[in-house]
Structures are given as structure tokens and as C-alpha cells.
Amino acid sequence: MTVYEGEAFVSAVPADRLQLTYGIDFPTAAIGRQWRTWCPATEPFATAIAPARTFTLQNSLNRCGPRV
């Protein structure tokens, strides 16, 4: 099953184990297109996902208003 919203989508397919694959596609070369697959049975969340960091782009911050 696949569900779309704009350019975003999520799919679910039958499998013997839980496996999550996700991707991003940004026009900014520093980020670009990236895909990652994670299987909780073989990679603990604490080491595979938890250390990840979030980010924002400067033009997104500019739309938030003046700095405090």
C-alpha cells in the first residue's frame, strides 16, 4: 500500500521483519538526495537513529522573522 501527499509518500509491503527505508531529496548540493534503511532487529535505535541531527536551511529561518 502506498499513500501520497504532494511529493511525499509512504509505502508498506509484506515482509518477514520490520525494515524502514526513508529518503530526502533537496536541491541544495550539501544535502542532495539521501536514502537510509534501518532494521531494528540488527541495529539498535540508540546507535543507528538516536545520534542523528536535524537541520534547517537559512531561507527557512529567514521566513520565521527577526532573531531574538
Image (cartoon, helix red, strand yellow):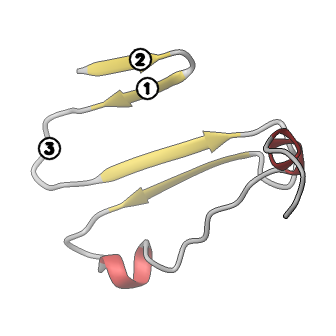
Residue 11: x and y in percent read 31, 29
Q: Secondary structure at mark 1?
A: strand
Q: Residues within 10 Å of mark 3 (few under 14, many from 20)?
A: few
Q: Residues within 10 Å of mark 1 (few under 14, many from 20)?
A: few
The residue type indicated by label 1 comes to: Phe
Q: Residues within 10 Å of mark 2 (few under 14, many from 20)?
A: few
Q: Is residue 16 left or right of residue 66?
A: left
Q: Quadrant of the C terminus?
A: bottom right
Q: Is residue 2 above or below residue 31?
A: above
Q: Mark 3 = which residue?
A: 15
Of the two numbered discs 3 and 1 on the same chain, state the one appearing first in sequence.
Answer: 1
The residues bearing labels 3 and 1 have C-alpha atoms spaced at a distance of 19 Å
The residues bearing labels 2 and 3 have C-alpha atoms spaced at a distance of 21 Å
CB of mark 2 within 8 Å of CB of mark 1? yes
Q: Is residue 10 left or right of residue 56?
A: left
Q: Nearer the viewer, residue 17 or 65?
A: 65
The residue at the point 18 percent across, 55 percent down is 18
Q: Mark 2 = which residue?
A: 4
Mark 2 vs mark 3: give the one in front. 2
Tell me the tag on residue 9.
Answer: 1
Q: How many marks?
A: 3
Q: Secondary structure at mark 2?
A: strand
